[in-house]
Image: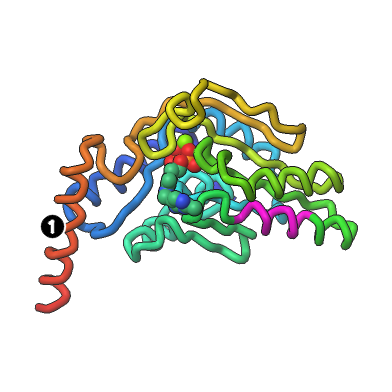
Amino acid sequence: MFNYTKEELISFEDKIYSLFEQGDLPFLIHLCGGNEDQLIEIFKEINEGDYIFSTHRTHYHYLLAGGSKSDLEEKIRNGDSMFVFNKKLNFLSTSILAGLTGAAAGTALALKLQNKQNKVWCFVGDGAEDEGHFYEAVSFVQGWDLPCTFIVEDNDRQVDTSKKERRGKDTIINWPSCVRRYFYTPTYPHASTGSGNIVKFKDLVISNYIKNLNNSNQ
Ligand SMILES: Cc1ncc(C[n+]2csc(CCOP(=O)(O)OP(=O)(O)O)c2C)c(N)n1
Ligand SMILES: [Mg+2]
């Protein structure tokens, strides 16, 4: 198990960002940042053997779950930033918004039926929180007292839209007790570049792709 500090988490993401800007990562990645303190606190409660279900923004979750930096960097270099999986760590992620919420509820049901002490921790963004199947999973977990906590990572952004733009009002949904929320201001824009400029991002993805294609043809 690694206990990464806030500084180590930040420097990991900074390195991944520079790899992207240099053209070494010809695909979409979602960088973490701004939520180091909150996540470090949450992961203090997570025990070995617990199940961790992550999102499209996996890097910090994976490192704090006990993944090594070199392993994660290799996965990212292979294009798996959004598809990080590690059976030993009971770590699974999905690029589909709220895509693992049903699986989290099912895993929690299995743990309960087997009288296991382990828990499920399922992370979602405030955008994923808008998905209907999140509601279904939360209702099931709450109703059957299952060992599962959903963490809403609320950066008030689904890609670039705020909760107010999406919902008409700046509503903070009052979920039952199996759901926790923390707020943070993200360091990086929604995906990949530090520029926040979607045109620059597309250009970078295309030029990175062509560069890698040329390299692989040599
Ligand atoms: C079902 C589904 N719809 C749309 C997308 C495209 N998509 C990827 S990330 C994202 C926004 C996610 O926002 P949020 O859940 O708040 O996470 P954040 O990026 O803010 O951490 C969207 C719409 C998707 N991955 N899955
Ligand atoms: Mg969000």
- The relative height of residue 66 versus residue 210 in the rendered view (above or below) is above
Quarter holding the C terminus is bottom left
Answer left or right for 94 relative to 34.
right
Q: What residue range appears in magenta?
A: 100-108
Picture colour scheme: rainbow
Any part of residue 9 in sight: no
Instruction: Tell me which residue sits at (31%, 54%) in the image.
Output: 28
Q: Quadrant of residue 10?
A: top left
Q: Amino acid at mark 1?
A: Ser
Tag 1 secondary structure: helix
Any part of residue 57 in sight: yes
Q: Give the residue furthest to the front.
A: 168
- Does residue 200 show up magenta in the picture? no
- Does residue 104 show up magenta in the picture? yes
- The relative height of residue 122 versus residue 73 in the rendered view (above or below) is above
Q: Give the residue furthest to the bottom.
A: 217
Q: Quadrant of residue 25?
A: bottom left
Answer left or right for 111 relative to 175.
right
Look at the magenta stretch and give its main secondary structure.
helix
Ligand 1 near label 1 (Cβ, under 8 Å)?
no
In this orientation, which residue lies closer to the viewer: 43 or 194? 194
Q: List x then y, in percent, for residue 89.
A: 62, 59
Residue where numbered disc 1 is placed:
207
Answer left or right for 6 relative to 26.
right
Instruction: Tell me which residue sits at (57%, 23%) in the image.
Output: 171
Q: Quadrant of residue 86?
A: bottom right
Q: List x then y, in percent, for residue 193.
A: 25, 42
Q: List x then y, in percent, for residue 34.
A: 43, 29
